[in-house]
């Protein structure tokens, strides 16, 4: 069910580095994004996949992993992603993209969850360095990177408590907690206030 996919789709930042993501799995995820809606059906998004160790090792230092976990510099080698999908846009088709990247990235993430994989959409990246590593021409804009692999962490969704803190955190057992606003706090009836 879709609800199960959504509830199980969390930002995963620690992976089982011994479990490869295959080229076929990456193609199937990009195909899901290809079939997703696109504003004015322009379809400006393109994707560069990386799953070979040499590329993975070069891309890893280009990524900012978790802004709220300031003492954590990213996953250790045994917990690094085994694939990346780098989302780019062809600026000649659409110089400005609005909703397409979000739709496509979420579709990829849901597809990954269905395959038993996990991922993390990351926009905190060194775009110029990734461009050089993957030989991306200048008429493409690098938008974000999706790190993928078999999850090697537990993520729990909590309701935001009364202090309103939205920052994710890890407890003493290294379980990752993600606070979410309550449903009644995000549906607003302006007519009856």
Image: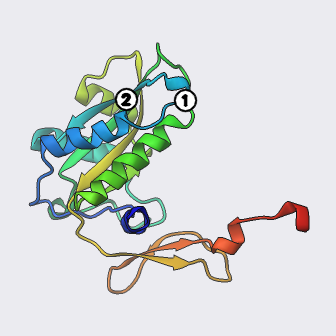
Above or below — where is 151 with respect to 105? below
Residue 128 disc label:
2
| Contact flag, marks 2 and 1 (Cβ < 8 Å) | no
Residue at image point 22% right, 54% down: 81
Kind of element beneath mark 1: helix
Above or below — where is 175 with respect to 11? below
| Foreground disc of the pair 2, 1 | 1
x%, y% of residue 93? 47, 16
x%, y% of residue 46? 35, 27
Q: Within 10 angstroms of label 1, few (less than 14), some, or many (20 or more) residues? A: few
**Outermost residue to the bottom:** 172
Kind of element beneath mark 2: helix
Report the quarter where the C terminus lies: bottom right
Which of these two is toward me, 180 or 17? 180
Above or below — where is 112 with respect to 79? above
Residue 118, picture quadrant: bottom left
Residue 64 as seen in the image, left or right of residue 81 = right
Residue 156 as seen in the image, left or right of residue 74 = right
Residue 103 as seen in the image, left or right of residue 88 = right
Residue at image point 47% right, 18% down: 91
Q: How is the image coloured?
A: rainbow
x%, y% of residue 14? 27, 64
Report the quarter where the N terminus lies: bottom left
Residue at image point 40% right, 83% down: 171
* Cα–Cα gap, marks 2 and 1: 26 Å
Residue 29, picture quadrant: top left
Number of numbered tags placed on the structure image: 2
Residue 39 disc label:
1
Q: Within 10 angstroms of label 2, few (less than 14), some, or many (20 or more) residues? A: few
């Amino acid at each position: 069910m879709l609800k199960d996919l959504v509830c199980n789709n969390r930002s995963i930042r620690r992976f089982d580095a011994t479990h490869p993501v295959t080229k076929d799995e990456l193609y199937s995820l990009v195909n899901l994004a290809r079939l997703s809606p696109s504003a004015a059906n322009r379809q400006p998004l393109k994707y560069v996949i990386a799953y070979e160790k040499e590329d993975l090792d070069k891309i890893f230092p280009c990524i900012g992993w978790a802004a709220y976990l300031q003492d954590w510099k990213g996953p250790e080698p045994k917990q690094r992603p085994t694939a990346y999908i780098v989302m780019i846009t062809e600026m000649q088709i659409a110089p400005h993209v609005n909703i397409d990247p979000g739709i496509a990235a979420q579709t990829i993430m849901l597809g990954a969850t269905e395959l038993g994989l996990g991922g993390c959409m990351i926009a905190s990246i060194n775009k110029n360095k990734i461009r050089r590593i993957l030989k991306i021409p200048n008429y493409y804009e690098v938008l974000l990177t999706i790190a993928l692999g078999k999850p090697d962490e537990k993520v729990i969704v909590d309701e935001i408590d009364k202090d309103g803190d939205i920052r994710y955190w890890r407890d003493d057992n290294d379980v990752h907690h993600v606070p979410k606003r309550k449903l009644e706090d995000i549906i607003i009836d302006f007519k009856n206030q």
